[in-house]
Image (tube, grey):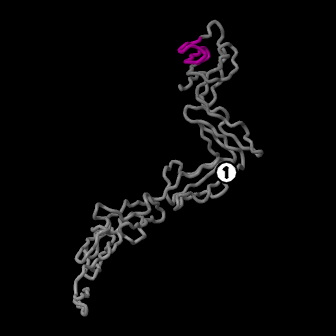
Amino acid sequence: MHCLFVCLSVASYQLIPMVLSAYCSSPPRVDHGKYSALESAKYTNGASVKYSCESGYVLIGEATIYCTASGAWSIPVPHCKAMRCPFPPKILHGKYIERDFRYGQSIRYKCDTGYSLVGEELVTCILAGSNAVKWSETPKCKVVQCKLPPSIENGAHSNQGTAVFTRGMSVQYTCKPGYTLTGEANLYCSDSGTWSPLPPHCEVTGCVTPDVQNGKVTLSEEEGRITIRCNPGYFLKGNHTIQCTLDRMWDSPPPTCVRGMYSCNAGCFLNLCDRVWVRLGRIKYSTTAVMVDGSSGGRPGHRRHFEGRRAPPPCPAPPGNWPAGRDFETPAL
């Protein structure tokens, strides 16, 4: 109520009450919300505004407030509250460790010992449409795996055929004959996915084991002695067994494995037999004739006879495991 003085005459005044319009200031702001009217509008007694919230929030209180005759807005003013996601999904061999499930907040997942996280560690409460929320994609936990065990020079580890090594698995290292293992023989796949402890190494303690291509070297029961056997289709050139001497040298040159294709040297065909075997094609021979298939000793299928003169002496048995006697037939390639 406002009063106004009115001059009635020179000597008297009269107090006349009158009502003037009241104005409210701009409506209160709310976090994550807005009101409907323009900010530049004038708010007189009885004017109203309506509040609404951003996506992911819900309005708490009356949505509409009014400008009162006193120039103040009606109370209480509403506010916007974040929506809550449901309880986060459980994952096998893991768990979440935060408890704030409100919109826009994140929780953290971690895996049990021996497992590693696949996916994002943080999962966030996000919008699911215009008026709902949900969790972003949750990760998974898989058992920890190690890379293939490290290789060592002049040695090897067990479980060579294993493609996947998981936490807790182990391998054992051994050295070739003539070498001694220095360090821990057993390595373990740890919880962190690495091999522990550091791999060992092999030090020379005797003769260096030869690397026989197309063959296999085995350690004999007698110390310092090795035996070499060739793969099928190959024949040994040299001694099957060799011995390591005190000066760390083999008592004879390490043998080699070569394809089982030998024939008597061409010199034999000319009565100049030097009794040396060379690699050729498939050959059948005797004291009187030689059959050569695909070799330099004759055309394929050609039989060479020694007519009119004495046949050349035969070459000795080819190297390797051949039966005794004069007639041999080499295996095909």
Choose between 228 and 89: the one closer to the eye: 89
Q: Residue at x 69, y 40 (%)?
A: 242
Q: Which amino acid, by three-letter code, is at mark 1?
A: Cys
Pick out the residue farthest to the bottom: 11
Q: Residue at x 64, y 34 (%)?
A: 256
Q: Disc 1 marks which residue?
A: 202
Would you place residue 307 above or below residue 4 in this image? above
When asked about the image quadrant of residue 29, the answer is bottom left
Count of labels in the image: 1
Q: Residue at x 32, y 75 (%)?
A: 25
x then y, percent, for residue 162:
50, 50
When asked about the image quadrant of residue 56, the answer is bottom left
Choose between 162 and 317: the one closer to the eye: 162
Pick out the residue farthest to the right: 247
Choose between 312 and 276: the one closer to the eye: 276
Q: Which residues are magenta?
A: 285-304
Pick out the residue farthest to the top: 308
In magenta stretch: residue 301: yes
In magenta stretch: residue 315: no
The quarter of the picture where the N terminus appears is bottom left
Q: Residue at x 69, y 46 (%)?
A: 224
Is residue 126 left or right of 326 when viewed as pictured?
A: left
Disc 1: CA contacts within 10 A as few (<14), some (14-19) or many (>=20): many
Is residue 94 left or right of 172 when viewed as pictured?
A: left
x then y, percent, for residue 184:
63, 58
Would you place residue 226 above or below residue 299 in this image? below
Choose between 293 and 99: the one closer to the eye: 99
Question: Which type of secondary structure does the marked residue at label 1 adopt?
Answer: strand
x then y, percent, for residue 13:
24, 91
